[in-house]
Amino acid sequence: MSSPESPVRERPGFFASAKAVFLNLFDADYVIPGREKYFKPDTELIDPVRLIPYIFLHSGCLLVIWAGFSWTALAVAAFLYFVRMFAITGFYHRYFSHKSFKTSRWFQFVMAVWGNTSMQRGPLWWASTHRHHHKHSDHEGDKHSVRMHGFLWAHIGWMTCSKNFPTDYSKIKDLTKYPELRFLNKYDFIVPLSLGALLWGTGALLERFAPGLGTNGFQIFVWGFFISTVILLHGTLFINSMAHAFGKRRFKTTDDSRNSLILALITLGEGWHNNHHRYHGSTRQGFYWWEIDITYYGLKLFSKLGLIRDLRPVPEHIYEEARNGGVQEVKKAA
Ligand SMILES: [Zn+2]
Ligand SMILES: [Zn+2]
């Protein structure tokens, strides 16, 4: 029996633990108590609780064994990959993280919901985590650095670490003033679950009214919700891992960022990552016409439609630096 002077920490019961895990999965601002070991600054640990969403998404792809294939389901998955990758790069990255253009409040909300369909958590978490990456890129403090942590951790390991789970609201004060964004960020499961229901419902309607397409609710759900999302996730994560390991360096930035056409095609423009690390304020990441940047073309179209405005260009001094071989070391942006 322990004395009152040396209390033994009570292990929470099964139901208390289950409730904490449930809250952690459905409330992005809830942190499970008693897990200090995962939050130590100098340790990088996979938290089994944080593995749950990724095991769920990846193992869900196996349902294709029972769901089967149809060209309709494949087209839905490809379409969802394209429009959600556009939302990640155009909205979560170039707008929420870098404010490289302006928009109205209602379209800002549309962009947040659209980005949230990608199942890469809420816009505020995404933006705060990404701003942190630019501040520390490939140096101490970077959450996902190939140089510091190895390829696999930089790719996906870091997302299974509880330390990287809470949103650092101090880095995104320009965004936290909008309650609708805070709500979306806190309950970041609502939009993905709604997408899942929409996909299942659409598939069921197609089965009933267009049986010639050979699909059904379950099949569209498996291809749209699981398969498309997992490919989208790894496509996006390639920028943290591959774009800091493979490709060419135009600018001698203080990180390992690289430019890659293949990654730019996979990610609709994010592959020009060395350009981006040199100057992250511009809307375009392909700095020249031959550097294909599909997201930029889409954003130009959105600006012509009046949905967004004031797209920020690449400054002349950056082009001048590129003409000179990008040789000068650049000071890290604060
Ligand atoms: Zn980077
Ligand atoms: Zn960035």
Image (tube, helix red, strand yellow):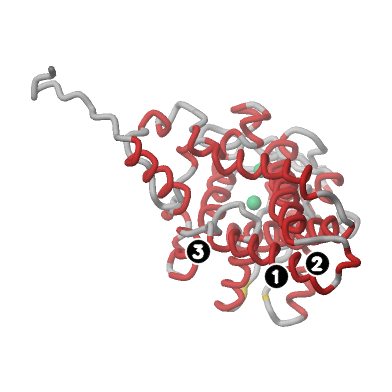
Which disc is residue 207 wearing? 2
Q: Earlier in the sequence, mark 1 or mark 3?
A: 3
Query: Observer-nearest residue: 114 or 143?
Result: 114
Q: Is residue 89 above or below residue 31?
A: below
Q: Position of residue 298 (x, y in %)?
A: 79, 68
- The residue under the point 70% across, 50% down is 226
Q: CA distance from mark 2 to mark 1?
A: 43 Å
Classify residue 268 as left or right of residue 162: right
Q: Is mark 1 within 8 Å of ligand 2?
A: no
Q: CA distance from mark 1 to mark 3?
A: 25 Å
Circle 3 crowding by C-alpha within 10 Å: few under 14, some 14–19, many from 20 = many
Circle 1 crowding by C-alpha within 10 Å: few under 14, some 14–19, many from 20 = many
Query: Observer-nearest residue: 193 or 124?
Result: 193
Q: Position of residue 34 (x, y in %)?
A: 32, 34
- Foreground tag (1 vs 3): 3
Q: Position of residue 219 (x, y in %)?
A: 77, 55
Q: Residue furthest left?
A: 4
Q: Is residue 298 above or below residue 235?
A: below
Amino acid type at circle 3 is Leu
**Which residue is identified by label 3?**
184
Q: Residue furthest bottom?
A: 306
Amino acid type at circle 2 is Glu
- Foreground tag (2 vs 1): 2
Q: Are marks 2 and 1 in contact (CB under 8 Å)?
A: no
Res 174 seen here: no
**Which residue is identified by label 1?**
311
Q: Are marks 1 and 3 in contact (CB under 8 Å)?
A: no
Q: Is residue 137 above or below residue 128?
A: above
Secondary element at tag 3: helix
Secondary element at tag 2: helix
